[in-house]
Structures are given as structure tokens and as C-alpha cells.
Image (cartoon, grey):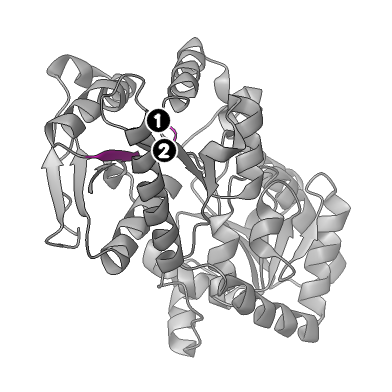
Amino acid sequence: MRIGMNALFYRFPSTGSGQYMTHLLNALAEVDGENEYVLLSPDDEPPNRANNSRFTYLKSPVPDFARRRVTSEKLVWEQFTAPQAARKAKVDLFHVPYFAPPYFSRVPSIITIHDVIPLRLPIYRTSPRMRAYLQLVSRAAHKAALIITVSQHARHDIMDALHLPAERIRVIYEAAGEEYRPVTDPATLAKARARYGLGERYIFYLGGLELRKNVLPLVRAFAHLYQKLNDPDLQLLIAGNPDKKSGPLFPDPRPVAANLGMTGQIIYRYIEEEDKPALYSGASVFVFPSSYEGFGLDPLEAMSCGAPVVCSNRTSLPEVVGDAAITFDPDNTGQLVAAMLSVLTNPELRADLRTRSLRQAAHFNWRKTATETLAAYEEAYKRSRKR
């Protein structure tokens, strides 16, 4: 087969969809020695892309009129330029690795839908433009030869929200990258802590500042925990920059922290990719209070580094963490406080959770993901030939 890939997310490499595409392509290069791949993008080829003789990169710019707005450029690329480029490249199958299937396309498509959160939570579709876009891609999903999703929970959500039959959806789990391994070197750990102003005892949260991530309840829970422990050295590291986005979807946690007297104990910083393994590894506990996830890559990365994990018990997260984490109801602040307190005050529990984390994380790997994706490609191609 000659397989096309919508490679738009090379421009957003640190996002979930960007990570998924990059890791999947790298793993496909390892497990697939037969098929050809054509990476289609409106941008120049990224300088750090690994070269492979069976992977061709083709730039197909959108028309000039569409470049005036980022949203217009993205829409024109997804619905017109990309499918036209796929047809011109004579691919047999076109993979869109995020929820943006083309409505009009002469090339059979396979779509990865990581989640349907915008269709589930009204706050994501307040604008007429977003509602129209969601309606378009929802209808277009019915034209795909096959759908890939990343958890059983997401599969049921897709079936319910998009009214797609179960037989057209394949669950293929994601995985943490190979770089996420326990860091034990004291100098490396100390250097990472120093870069972010951390002491040796810190709670780590990484996963975004959106409302559904429950960062404000986390700040409140940390304040309760801090009072219970009476430990002046305990810190909370929240990955992200509250100044970057604002509004109802991105509530600022700093006023809540200030009202609780926690301003000096909470650090808000964008985390560099190369520092994540050390920060996960050195954390006294990694906490993930999100109420809605399609998969849950952040706690999986933390477990891959051997971090003790305290995690929400909602949506797809139990599938990812299994019995390796202490889970809690994200609407119950008391449960979150109790879970963090138990880990911080019980060295035996902390050590047991670190062992369980590594065991659970070993169930997920990108070679397995790529192998199952390759089987989905073959199935989708056969389905398209029968139409």
C-alpha cells in the first residue's frame, strides 16, 4: 500500500496529536518494511524529522486567501488541500491522525479520534464557528473506512455521540515515548529541580490548565494538605503558563492560591520536553485530577518513570492506570487530599506504587501500537475496495 498521512501536527509537536503522530510514524518505520508512506503538510519539512527511504514528505500549501486566519487555513487544509494532495500523490489510504476527517475525498480515509470531548462538554462549543466545524467533522466521520480510537471509553463515547456502529471502530492504545524511563542519577535530578526552583519534596501536575483538568480543585486540595502536614518545604509544581490563555475554559489558579496563602508554595512553569523524565522521576507524587480524558498519556508517562501516581477515576483513566495508582473521585476534594497524604506519609506505599507504575506502564508500547495500526490500515483498505 501507499499510505498518506495528514502531517499538519508537525507544527504542534508537543500537543497530544503531535506526539501521537510522531511516535506512531517512528514505530511504523520499525515494524513495517513493505508499505510506502507519504507525509502531507502545508508546511516546510521539519528539520528534525528522521529520514527513511519509504517515507516521503510533500508540502502542499493552502491557497493564499486561506492564510489570513489560522482557523481558515486549518479548515481549508483539512477539507480541500490535504485530500487533493492525497489524491495527487496516488495514495491508497489517507490517515488523518486527529478528529478532522475530510467530507469530500476520493481517497479512502482512516481517522484517529482521540476523544469527542467537544461534543460532550458544552463549554467547548460556545461559538457558532466551533459548532459548525464540529457538525462538519462529525458528518465526515461517517465517510471514513475505519475509525481508530485510543480507549474503550472513547470508543463508547464515539458510538454514542457520532452514532457510529461498533464494528467500524478499533481501539488501539497509545504509549509513552522511549525517553520516559526512571531517572536515578542524583545530579540529573538535582539539576532539573534547580531549573524550576524545586526542593526535594514536590507534588507534580502536568496535563494542561483547561477547566476539565480540575487545577483549581487541585490547588484547594494542596492547601488542605499543606496545613495537615505542616511541612514548609512541600511544593506543588503545575506545568503550564496561566498567562498564555484565559477565559472560562482556562480559569487562572493563581487568585485561588493567593486567597489560600499558597502563592509561595506553588510553581507555574512551562516544562521543557527534555526535563519531563527527571521531574516525573523525582516527584514525591504525580497527581492527575482530570474529569475527562480520551486516553491519559500524562499519567502513563509518569508511571513509565516510576512515579507514584494519584489519579482521577473518571472516563478512560482507569484503563490506563489499572491498579498501579490511587484513584479518587475528582469531585471530592477530601478524597484527593487523603490520597496525596497517604502517599506522602507512607514510604512503603510510595515504594509499592513506584513498582506498580513500572509494571503497568510496560503494558503499553509504540511498537504494539504501530503493529495494530498497520492491521487497521489493511482492514480499512479492504473495506474501501468492497464499497
Which residue is identified by label 2? 111
For the point 75% across and 69% down, the residue is 323
What's the residue type where badge 1 is placed?
Ala
Secondary structure under tag 2 reads: strand
Residue 149 drawn at (x, y percent): 52, 45
Q: Cβ–Cβ below 8 Å for labels 2 and 1?
A: yes
Corner quadrant of residue 380: top left
Work out which residue is located at the far front of the displayed protein and give it: 386
Corner quadrant of residue 336: bottom right
Residue 232 drawn at (x, y percent): 73, 71
Secondary structure under tag 1 reads: loop
Queried whether the magenta region covers residue 264, the answer comes back as no
From the image, state whether disc 2 or disc 1 is nearer to you. 2
Is residue 58 rendered to the left or right of residue 224?
Answer: left
Instruction: Please give the range of residues in magenta.
Output: 92-99
Query: Is residue 372 placed above or below 214 in the rendered structure?
Result: below
Res. 253 in view: no
For the point 53% across and 67% down, the residue is 364
Residue 57 drawn at (x, y percent): 14, 47
Mark seen at residue 100: 1
In terms of depth relative to the viewer, which is nearer, 327 or 258? 327
Circle 2 crowding by C-alpha within 10 Å: few under 14, some 14–19, many from 20: many
Circle 1 crowding by C-alpha within 10 Å: few under 14, some 14–19, many from 20: many
Res. 108 in view: yes
What's the residue type where badge 2 is placed?
Ile
